[in-house]
Amino acid sequence: MQVYLDYSATTPTRKEAIAVMQAVLTQQWGNPSSLHEWGQRAATVVEQARMQVAGLINAPAESIVFTSGGTEADNLAIMGVARLYTKPQHIIISSIEHSAVAEPARLLEQWGWEVTRLRVDSKGRVNPLDLKAALQDNTVLVSVIYGQNEVGTVQPIAELGNIARNAGVLFHTDAVQVVGRLPINVQTLPVDLLSISSHKIYGSQGAGALYVRPGVELVPLLGGGGQEKRLRSGTQAVPAIASFGVAAELAGKEMATETPRLMQLRDRLFSQLADIPGLIPTGDLIHRLPHHVSFCLEHADGEKLSGRTLVRELNRAGIGISAGAACNSGKLSPSPILLAMGYSDKAALAGVRMTLGRDTTQADIDWVAMVFKQILQRLSPVELVVIS
């Protein structure tokens, strides 16, 4: 029995998205910038997808800038604002950002920018009062992840965005894990920039988007032909963008039924694993992504009982999950997200994530819970070795 529970890493491309990709590759393969019929057929595909993606977050179509994925969208938001300034300024991020935000912020810091990293509580939530206190006269951007990919916590984005807006500061959120799973309406949500990824909502890999609120200025990262309103030069990946559009439209239609179904399965898995000694749920259990289950082994024996060990053992049983700890130069590094939430180094080495999706069934949940318990019973520190 094969069970995939890593939908936060990537989702399988749905058949409708594959079908539109095939149609584009065989019939609408022109360059969208070309003026002839072949080019205009491709341009029509891109604009149709733009409307579909915009519809998912209730945005005007012209506010959607297509990118290669969520990482590029995050980088365009952070660096696109920073490059407006000739001298270093101040930005604010959370201490649990995805690396697609954390790394550009670190780079800006090396260039002399001041970066404030907002602390989070033990559930991974930012306190809006901390954002208020962190604002400075030279703050030009706040970026807080909407739904944390590793621990599932959903931030109070509306409240945080209002604080930034009232201070006249641009606000960006990485909504890659949220879009298509929870309703988003940028007409009422106080965000200026919002990142989306196709392959998190059953579109193909290789496409993403940045919502740019009308009137917000950015400096492009790439020099070139000026595609995407001069914000993202380069010939658009028409097949991937087309699949993105179809996936976005279907996600919007299915959300009302799929999100409650995922929440029920999520809670069932939490419940079935609740009696395992030392297995501690991570993240906020109330303000949480609907498809997201995560734990750490509170008293794990450091690198001997790591999240990566559990990933490997479950993979041998035909179950796909992921771990937060990273392997660098043959040595495991604790999850920086769990460390920021106050977990010990040992616990932060033993975090795992199980994320559910369209193909996940109740039978899958019950099977995974049973196998996971068996693996934990079988493993002992004496038998384990460091995963390299």
Image (cartoon, helix red, strand yellow):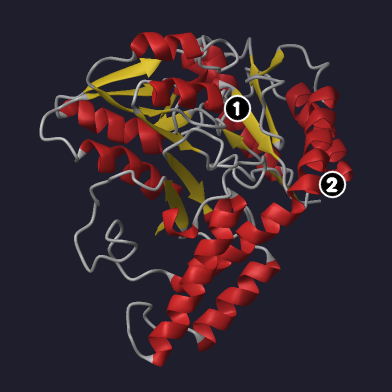
Report x, y in % for residue 297.
Answer: 65, 17
Tell me the residue at 82%/47% (across/down). Answer: 257
Tell me the residue at 61%/14% (across/down). Answer: 300
- The answer to whether residue 374 of the structure is visible from this angle is no
Tell me the residue at 78%/33% (across/down). Answer: 266
User: Dot 1 lies on which element?
Assistant: loop
Q: Is residue 175 left or right of residue 95?
A: right
Q: Is residue 127 left or right of residue 36?
A: right
Which of the numbered marks, if any, corresponds to residue 98? none
Dot 1, how many residues are within 10 Å of its Cα: few (below 14), some (14-19), or many (20+)?
Answer: many
Report x, y in % for residue 320.
Answer: 67, 44
Q: Residue furthest bottom?
A: 37
Q: Nearer the viewer, mark 1 or mark 2?
A: 1
- The answer to whether residue 144 of the structure is visible from this angle is yes
Tell me which numbered mark, 1 or 2, is placed earlier along the sequence.
1
Report x, y in % for residue 10.
Answer: 58, 50
Residue pointed to by mark 2: 361
For the residues labelled 1 and 2, the Cα–Cα distance comes to 24 Å
Dot 2, how many residues are within 10 Å of its Cα: few (below 14), some (14-19), or many (20+)?
Answer: some
Report x, y in % for residue 169.
Answer: 34, 27
Q: Residue furthest left?
A: 86
Is there CB contact under 8 Å for labels 1 and 2? no
Q: Between 176 and 340, which is closer to the camera in this rendering? A: 176
Q: Which three-letter amino acid code belongs to the residue tagged 1?
A: Val
User: Dot 2 lies on which element?
Assistant: loop
Establish if 362 lies above or below 47.
Answer: above
Q: Which three-letter amino acid code belongs to the residue tagged 2?
A: Thr
Residue pointed to by mark 1: 154
Q: Between 132 and 384, which is closer to the camera in this rendering? A: 132
Establish if 56 lies above or below 354.
Answer: below
